Amino acid sequence: MAYAHITGWGMAVPEKILTNDDLSQMVETNDEWIRSRTGIQERRIAADEQSSATLATDAAIKALDVANLKPTDLDLVIVSSSSPEHIFPSTASLVQDRIGASKAGAFDLSAACTGFIYAVDMGANAIRSGSLQNVLVIGTETLSRFVDWTDRNTCILFGDGAGAFVLQADERPGGVLASVLHSDGSGGDLLTLPAGGSKQPADAATVRDGLHFIQMDGKGVFRFATRVMARATKEAIEKVGLTTDDLDLVVPHQANLRIIDAAARGLKMPIEKFMINLERYGNTSTASIPIATVEAFERGRLKAGDKVVFVGFGAGLTWGALVAEWSGPRPVEKRVNHNLYVVWARIRSLILRGMRIVEGLLWGKYGRKK
Ligand code: UT7
């Protein structure tokens, strides 16, 4: 039987910081209100040249570096995002090309802020079934591009960033142990991006009415979140016979400190067992759990053998929890030079594009005769 171990992790956030004071110059709000209602102090905003794919690529390369895995050894790239580069092609395919994962399949997954949990679950199941060996899972967002910067209800919450895990097959027990995934589409209208899809394609009217911006019933989402966070955590750990006492760390979706507090109370766990970094990044949606995990590791809060729960909620409505035994870094014999792979990936991509142009020319010249 194969186990799916988390062997690599990486994060990438834009350099530009937007503070609560900055926001108070843009909408009628203030630092005190935002801090006390959400816990957020600042968030990162993508520069013009950054996008969900560039942040995802940066996080992915760091995760591959930690795992010391060549991109050519990847079997699958899954990108979870609510702000993908396009409806199609998938952001995952763009990342697959940029990192040079020449043998990997790639697809995007849409489950909003819960997406990273869904994606890790998909990747881990593919490994446990024996069909894949190495899976790259990424959560990436540039939700700042979909925020109405005149709407104080939403613009104070969201930030940009990406986080990635490498999952690898191993016969040693451990890694991803169990998960629970849930959805309740009857609450889909609580948090939505109404236009730009097939129901309301972009036109002058949708743009005029601001339907390409995030719309949210904050209180409704808040009530739902406080209900499901503790419940999903309990469900996931009960599946593998663990109790909250067995948990070393909970990495919750970083949406609002009050929601995380409520989850801690619901689980009767001390808040110290929860990883919290939303004060510096805001809500980075599906990227928040991997970003918080990377920082938990860097702060020495995750050691090999630790039992950790990732738990989240979001639009859909969706929610879920995943319990894992942290594997820690693998012993490294010979380091993979990822800088070389990045250059190689760029050259490979150019050659493939060039070949397609030549193919088109030849087809034009000889293909028509058939
Ligand atoms: O990943 C999932 C994403 N979504 C979420 O996690 C959202 C979950 N919900 C929340 O985090 C909270 O509901 C919010 C932070 C969005 C709002 O906090 P709240 O405690 O539910 O505030 P509220 O909407 O009940 O507003 C309270 C008051 C209102 O004024 P009145 O009607 O009491 O006079 C608002 O108009 O605060 C006002 N208000 C603000 N004041 C200053 C709302 N937004 C702001 C603001 N600054 N940014």
Image: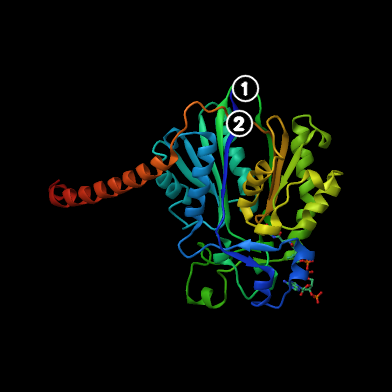
Q: Determine whether 167 is above or below 186 in the image.
A: above
Image height check: is 219 above or below 76? below
Please name the residue shown 51% across and 28% down the image.
Answer: 131
Does any portion of residue 158 appear in the rendered image?
Answer: no
Q: Secondary structure at mark 2?
A: strand
Q: Is residue 311 above or below residue 207?
A: above
Check disc 2 and report the residue beneath it. Answer: 5
Quarter, ligand 1: bottom right
Task: Say few, some or many: other residues with alpha carbon within 10 Å of mark 2 (under 14 / 14 to 19 / 20 or more).
Answer: many
**Mark 1 and mark 2 residues within 8 Å of each other at the beta carbon:** yes
Q: Is residue 60 left or right of residue 366?
A: right
- Sequence-wise, the earlier of marks 1 and 2 is 2
Q: In the rendered image, is residue 322 in sight?
A: yes
Q: Residue 187 or 320: which is nearer the viewer?
A: 320
- Residue 310, quarter of picture: top right
Q: Which residue is under mark 1?
A: 172
Could you tell me residue 266's position as x and y percent? Answer: 85, 47
